[in-house]
Image (cartoon, grey):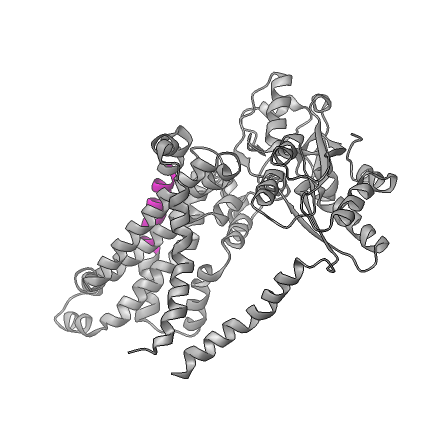
């Protein structure tokens, strides 16, 4: 039961969020849609986006899962501060993240010299795109998984341990299966965030077809010269986003 | 139950003054001149706007800088610009075709390309041909952007093929990659190298003289500030205005 007048601002808010999507769909040049989204540049961008987002999601899982465990299941001085700092990329403008990455891993960055000695140059490479995406997407996985871990509680872990299971066995056979839905929805969110990443990528990785020009960069580039193609590719991203949300909702539903 | 109402009020309060401010913009008594100018004009037009404000008491000049085609798109979509200065004639021609200019555009400056390298020139770039050297990290503008089109043109004239590690959306993005030392070299305008000061070094090359970008300026149609708009255009074309542009490295049109 809510006050009836709340419906008015709620409807306004919904219209504000949905109308632009309707306008975007209305602007699509359907007659040329297939050609627009299958041009070599578009296909390169889409394929690059999917590949890099998959790689960064995997990195988020590999590094984010242990981080969520540490944050949810241990306590040490300064943990609260650490958690806030780890979640910083959530609220940081991505372009700031890009600059920070540049001054860390760039040629003249904090680790640039060491990387150079090892023969590693990340700037302008697909690796840089994956790093930018991982930087902005990791907090989504950590938040989602930490929440799931706290909700699941420790009871089953304690029981398993009391029955003689080693910590690694408990982690693999009890904790992870319990929070799998949380992990899946966190991974889906991280994937979606990676797919949409723009600011950090253009600052840190540059823009070159097939190497660093992901779908959002391609759209940004096209919007001046080929509006129809930009709109068509935008729609592709909207469809992917809708699929992702549907998928994430299902993941949560099974919790 | 009270909380949502309070939140709504808090959200609505800052909206109220801005809504009234929007409507007063259309009034004739408001003395704000809005100038849309290509990103490469940032230092010079900031200076000229100050001069204009000093000469016209009570007039406030608002500046919006960006890629020329970006700004043109905004004006085509109804952005409240009074004056438009473009970095190339093609973009201005689009506005003329759409009847969005109040007077014929006038060319007021020219610009040519220069190679920008990080201080000390670590990759030893001395000629245009050096940009085609394998392994050199070269950053240029995308071919769709005026500075990128110019870069392709000089490469064609010199008979070399550019193989950049990145094609950026604007000349400032190219400069950023050079100043941070990520790129060994970038192709930007002479004026960008000058404006960047010690952050980059410029390497002039002979072929640049053959590819000249011309900057046109025009008052925008239906501006509501047509007199002030024309006066600003006149200032840019005046000896004083031209001197500011010369000092920044622009050529005479």
Camera-side residue of A111 and B35: B35
Q: Say which quarter of the image contains residue B104.
A: top right
x, y (%) of residue B116?
A: 67, 34
In the figure, A81 relative to B25: above or below?
A: below
Camera-side residue of B119 and A3: A3
In the figure, A94 relative to A118: above or below?
A: below
x, y (%) of residue A17?
A: 40, 58
Is residue A213 at least partly visible in the picture? no
In the figure, A219 relative to B127: above or below?
A: below
User: Is B147 inside the magenta-drawn segment?
Assistant: no
x, y (%) of residue A9?
A: 41, 69
Quadrant containing the N terminus of chain A is: bottom left
Quadrant containing the C terminus of chain A is: bottom left
Residue found 43% across the figure and 47% down from its top: A131
The extreme left residue here reads A163
In the picture, measured across the screen, residue A233 lies left or right of residue B113, that is left
Camera-side residue of A124 and A250: A250
User: Is A60 inside the magenta-drawn segment?
Assistant: yes
């Amino acid at each position: 039961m809510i006050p009836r007048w709340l419906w008015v601002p709620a409807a306004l808010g919904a219209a504000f969020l949905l109308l632009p999507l309707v306008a975007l769909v209305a602007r699509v040049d359907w007659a040329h849609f297939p050609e627009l989204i299958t041009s070599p540049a578009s296909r390169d961008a889409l394929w690059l986006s999917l590949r890099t987002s998959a790689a960064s999601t995997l990195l988020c899982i590999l590094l984010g899962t242990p981080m969520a465990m540490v944050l949810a299941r241990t306590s040490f001085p300064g943990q609260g501060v650490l958690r806030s700092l780890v979640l910083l990329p959530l609220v940081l403008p991505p372009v700031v993240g890009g600059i920070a990455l540049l001054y860390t891993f760039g040629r003249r960055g904090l680790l640039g010299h060491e990387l150079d000695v090892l023969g590693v140059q990340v700037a302008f490479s697909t690796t840089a795109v994956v790093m930018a995406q991982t930087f902005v997407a990791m907090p989504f996985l950590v938040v989602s998984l930490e929440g799931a871990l706290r909700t699941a509680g420790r009871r089953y872990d304690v029981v398993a341990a009391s029955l003689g299971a080693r910590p690694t066995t408990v982690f693999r056979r009890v904790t992870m299966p319990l929070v799998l839905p949380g992990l899946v929805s966190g991974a889906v969110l991280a994937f979606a965030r990676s797919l949409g990443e723009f600011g950090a990528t253009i600052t840190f990785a540059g823009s070159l077809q097939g190497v660093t020009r992901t779908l959002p960069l391609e759209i940004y580039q096209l919007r001046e010269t080929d509006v129809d193609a930009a709109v068509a590719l935008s729609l592709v991203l909207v469809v992917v986003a809708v699929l992702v949300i549907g998928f994430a909702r299902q993941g949560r539903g099974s919790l | 139950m009270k909380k949502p109402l309070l939140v709504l009020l808090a959200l609505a309060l800052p909206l109220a003054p801005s809504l009234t401010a929007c409507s007063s913009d259309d009034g004739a008594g408001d003395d704000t001149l809005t100038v849309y100018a290509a990103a490469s004009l940032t230092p010079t037009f900031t200076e000229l706007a100050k001069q204009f404000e000093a000469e016209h008491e009570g007039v406030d000049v608002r500046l919006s800088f960006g890629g020329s085609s970006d700004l043109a798109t905004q004006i085509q979509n109804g952005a409240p610009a009074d004056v438009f200065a473009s970095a190339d004639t093609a973009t201005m021609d689009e506005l003329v075709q759409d009847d969005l200019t109040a007077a014929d555009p006038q060319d007021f400056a020219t610009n040519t390309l220069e190679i920008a390298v990080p201080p000390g020139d670590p990759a030893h770039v001395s000629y245009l041909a050096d940009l085609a050297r394998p392994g050199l990290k070269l950053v240029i503008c995308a071919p769709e952007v005026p500075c990128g089109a110019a870069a392709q043109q000089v490469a064609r004239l010199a008979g070399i093929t550019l193989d950049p590690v990145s094609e950026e959306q604007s000349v400032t993005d190219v400069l950023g990659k050079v100043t941070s030392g990520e790129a060994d070299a970038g192709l930007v305008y002479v004026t960008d190298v000058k404006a960047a000061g010690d952050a980059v070094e410029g390497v002039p090359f002979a072929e640049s003289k053959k590819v000249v970008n011309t900057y046109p300026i025009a008052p925008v149609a239906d501006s509501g500030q047509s007199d002030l708009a024309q006066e600003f255009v006149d200032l840019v074309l005046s000896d004083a205005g031209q001197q500011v542009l010369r000092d920044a490295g622009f050529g005479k049109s």
